[in-house]
Image (cartoon, rainbow, N blue to C red):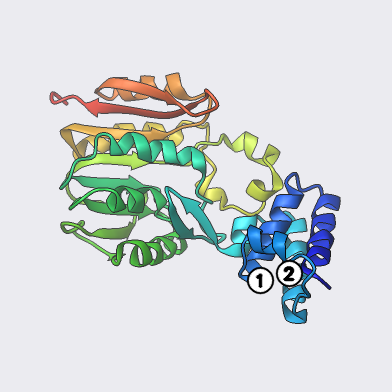
Amino acid sequence: MTYGEVYSAGKETLAKAGIEEAAQDARLLLEYVCGTDRSYLLAHGDEPVEEEKRLAYLRLTDRRALRIPLQQLTGTQSFMGLEFHINEHVLIPRQDTEILVEEALKHLHDGMRVLDMCTGSGCILISLLRYTNGCQGLGTDISPEALKVAQENAVRLLSEGRGCEDGPEPGRACFLQSDLFGNVKGIFDMIVSNPPYIPSAVIDTLMPEVRDHEPRIALDGGDGLLFYRRITEECGTHLAGGGMLFFEIGYDQGEAVRSLMEQAGFIDVHVVDDYAGLNRVVYGTLSLGV
């Protein structure tokens, strides 16, 4: 079979399975298997595909038809211009989360200490450290499987990444298993978090790719505000006076999270919308008097 014929077969499989972006996913999987890009496939659609690659591609399209996320099949996702390795133990980095990183970078100065809670793949922390100089970063997560992914990403993208007990050293990223602040030591200039924020009752209504294949522990936010409430209430012993707290939030949680932060002693609290005009980030500064 030719590239064009193999691609058509994959696209048909995905379309029959109800995959919304069947054509795009079929193409990306073929590029992944063949190690080519879109331009090559367009220019060489009549060339034959090696049998081994044809079979590998059809296996992947069959798995994608089962609603396994594309990124889990390829094992990678682009975020902030970097390629992160991911698997079923971490949330897939999303473009919306880049807004959190972009807002934090506006306030993260060289040499600061930053804590990333619920770090998952490490995409937030690693991006912040990659685009600043001499900052110290600690990423925490309750999942040891997620921390393994984050450490591997740090080794690739920062040439460093390790476990730690006493906090980060200058210029380093380290990772620690912790239920929020449970095992955290030290004071930080900035805390960032994309915590679980989907209400428990809503999870069963999500797309199968998310509901069935991404880690529920990284999705389930109880009433939706559980982790925002805990982090704002508990962060005072680890956030310097005048330090900043940044959250990614759900599209309808802006005012509720703003209120939680203000009640906990944060000032200059801002709600930032995403490119669709929906609430996406809330951040503020811890009052020096707290």
The circle on residue 147 is none
Q: Amino acid at mark 1?
A: Cys
Above or below, 2 relative to 215: below
> Would you name the residue on which mark 2 appears?
57
Q: Does the image show residue 183?
A: no
The circle on residue 34 is 1
Q: Quadrant of residue 142?
A: bottom left
Identify the residue shown where x is 23% and y is 61%: 165
Going from N to C along the chain, the mark reached first, 2 or 1, is: 1
The quadrant of the picture occupied by the N terminus is bottom right
Residue 140 horizontal/vertical position (percent): 34, 53
Q: Does the image show residue 212?
A: yes
Tell me the distance, in whole angstroms, between the alpha carbons under discs 2 and 1.
9 Å
Residue located farthest toward the front when viewing the structure as drawn: 43
Residue 147 horizontal/vertical position (percent): 40, 61
The quadrant of the picture occupied by the C terminus is top left
Identify the residue shown where x is 28% and y is 40%: 191
Residue 155 horizontal/vertical position (percent): 34, 67
Q: Quadrant of residue 36?
A: bottom right
Q: Amino acid at mark 2?
A: Tyr
Residue 107 horizontal/vertical position (percent): 24, 34
User: Is residue 19 left or right of 116 when viewed as pictured?
Assistant: right
> Which element is circle 1 on?
helix
Above or below, 285 relative to 117: above
Query: Is the residue under label 1 in contact with that under label 2 (CB below 8 Å)?
Result: yes
Identify the residue shown where x is 52% and y is 23%: 277
Q: Quadrant of residue 82?
A: bottom left
Q: Nearer the viewer, residue 158 or 124?
A: 158
Pointer 2 local density, CA inside 10 Å: few below 14, some 14–19, many at least 20: many
Above or below, 62 relative to 195: below
